[in-house]
Image (tube, grey):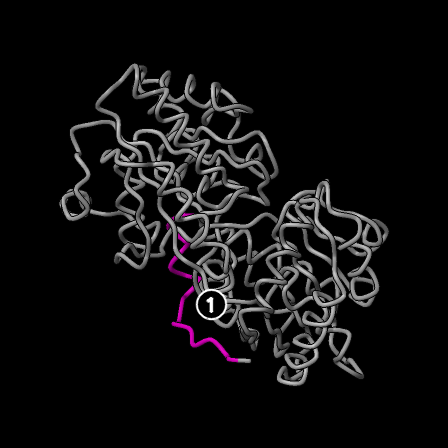
């Protein structure tokens, strides 16, 4: 297990955005946790919303006086294939749990538990990949918290049943929505904490117009024509083929429209390249569809630029734990057309900050409406930024975590 190296951040830098009062409340909570230690454990240090949050949350925990660390589990290709199956099953995919899956999962859980030092007051385990490490941790002085980032509203009962004995060992749980809480966690110590974005990160900080235009030029995107963007893993739950179909319906009415499908290829997602290839085949030879990845040099600054140049952002998910790329777009005052699932309705207030949709036809209709009504689209984007400011910034996330840790102390 590797410890992630992190840059320093200062909570005071956020005062201009969220106000001195919010900073004072956070610092008062942190004083109650003076000299406490916490470790966050997950499966990758880059390529996804969890890692993006931890790159900002853990340094801020350190800045307010907590001994905070972040460790990443290790595993081979077979292990991550198995844990991807666990991820899909907990989001409701019908599949069988085999004895080999159990064997691989538990074997790596034991190996990782042996590599994880337990000399912390709080251990926060993120998502299914490292969940069972608690089973091999021996005598525990720590308080253990399982943080679930996925949509567990309709889980595969066989997989959940297998994990239930491990879940029963945890002291507390964190979910993004109340409807994700399933047995055996319903009567446990549960906190509802939404994910967040950092307004000062490379992905969300203000950019000069020249930076935005230079990025578009580098990737052959025309700034004079309408841009639709979905930032999401190439994953069946994100429905990239449905996004392409919606774009094609819009293009029949507005031929100059462009579509950007942007992702980072995370090492804990072995299915990513399979669905990238399927998406590329679906896109065919339409040169107005751009498949953009970190392998092509598309990092956080580039994503920031693309989102700021976007006319309508999409996240047409079929399942969605929260959908941080919705938050990112709204922060940049871009209206969102999002699937009416999971955590998206927390952010996309239908008709206010964007539109919620259930079908390809609805996605195309609402996208075309926003493109044809730019003044209304801008007003939705403005309201979206205000909504994010109140609810989904890293400072609130930090405060919610500190509140839970104080309660567990």
Residues in magenta? Answer: 2-18
Q: From the top left corner, tell me how far across and down residue 338 is, in percent.
A: 49, 31
Magenta highlight on residue 114: no
297 and 103: which is toward the camera: 103
* Left or right: 229 as drawn, with respect to 226: right
Instruction: Give x and y (percent) for residue 24.
Output: 52, 58
**Quarter location, residue 1:** bottom right
Give residue 299's quadrant in the image: bottom left
Q: What element does badge 1 sit on?
A: loop
Instruction: Write down the residue under mark 1.
Output: 45
Please tell me which residue is depicted at 65% across the width and 66% down the height of the picture.
Answer: 125
Q: Nearer the viewer, residue 117 or 109?
A: 109
| Location of residue 174 in the rendering, given as x and y in whole percent from the top left corner | 68, 55
Q: Residue at x 53, y 23 (%)?
A: 359
Q: Considering the image in quadrants, where does the C terminus appear?
A: bottom right
Q: Position of residue 50 (x, y in %)?
A: 52, 58
Classify 2 as above or below 193: below
In the rendered structure, the answer to whether residue 405 lies left or right of residue 312 reads: right
Indicate left or right for 337 with 122 as reference. left
> How many numbered callouts?
1
**Neighbour class for label 1 at 10 Å: few (<14), some, many (≥20)?**
many
Camera-side residue of 104 and 267: 104
Magenta segment includes 8: yes
Between 387 and 180, the one lying in front of the other is: 180
User: On the rendered structure, is 118 left or right of 170?
Assistant: left
Say if 303 sits above or below 318 in the image. Answer: below
């Amino acid at each position: 297990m590797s410890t992630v190296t992190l840059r320093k951040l200062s909570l005071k830098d956020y005062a201009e955005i969220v106000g001195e009062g919010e900073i004072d409340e956070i610092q008062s909570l942190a004083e109650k946790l003076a000299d406490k230690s916490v470790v966050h454990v997950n499966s990758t240090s880059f390529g996804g919303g969890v890692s993006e949050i931890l790159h900002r949350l853990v340094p801020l925990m350190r800045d307010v006086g907590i001994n905070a660390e972040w460790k990443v589990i290790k595993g081979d290709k077979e292990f991550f294939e198995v844990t991807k199956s666990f991820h899909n099953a907990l989001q409701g995919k019908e599949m069988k749990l085999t004895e080999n899956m159990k064997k691989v999962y538990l074997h790596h859980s034991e190996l990782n538990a042996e590599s994880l030092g337990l000399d912390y007051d709080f251990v926060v385990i993120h998502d299914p990949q490292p969940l069972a490490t608690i089973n091999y941790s021996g005598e525990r002085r720590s308080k253990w918290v399982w943080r679930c980032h996925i949509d567990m509203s309709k889980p595969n009962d066989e997989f959940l049943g297998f994990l239930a004995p491990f879940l029963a060992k945890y002291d507390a749980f964190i979910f993004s929505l109340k409807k994700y809480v399933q047995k055996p966690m319903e009567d446990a110590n549960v906190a509802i904490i939404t994910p967040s974005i950092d307004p000062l990160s490379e992905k969300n900080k203000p950019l000069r117009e020249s930076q935005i235009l230079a990025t578009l030029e580098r990737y052959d995107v025309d700034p004079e024509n309408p841009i639709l963007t979905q930032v999401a893993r190439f994953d069946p739950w994100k429905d990239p083929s449905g996004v392409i179909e919606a774009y094609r319906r819009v293009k029949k009415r507005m031929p100059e429209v462009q579509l950007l499908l942007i992702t980072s290829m995370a090492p804990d997602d072995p299915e990513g390249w399979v669905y990238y290839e399927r998406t590329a085949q679906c896109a065919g030879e339409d040169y107005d569809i751009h498949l953009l990845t970190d392998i092509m040099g598309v990092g956080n600054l580039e994503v920031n630029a693309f989102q700021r140049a976007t006319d309508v952002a999409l996240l047409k998910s079929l399942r969605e734990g929260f959908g941080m790329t919705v938050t990112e777009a709204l922060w940049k005052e871009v209206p969102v057309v999002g699937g009416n699932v999971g955590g998206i309705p927390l952010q996309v207030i239908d008709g206010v900050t964007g539109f919620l949709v259930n079908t390809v036809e609805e996605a195309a209709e609402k996208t075309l409406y926003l493109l044809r009504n730019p003044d209304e689209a801008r007003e939705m984007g403005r309201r979206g930024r205000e909504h994010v400011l109140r609810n989904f910034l890293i400072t609130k996330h930090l405060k919610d975590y500190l509140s839970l840790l104080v309660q567990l102390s």
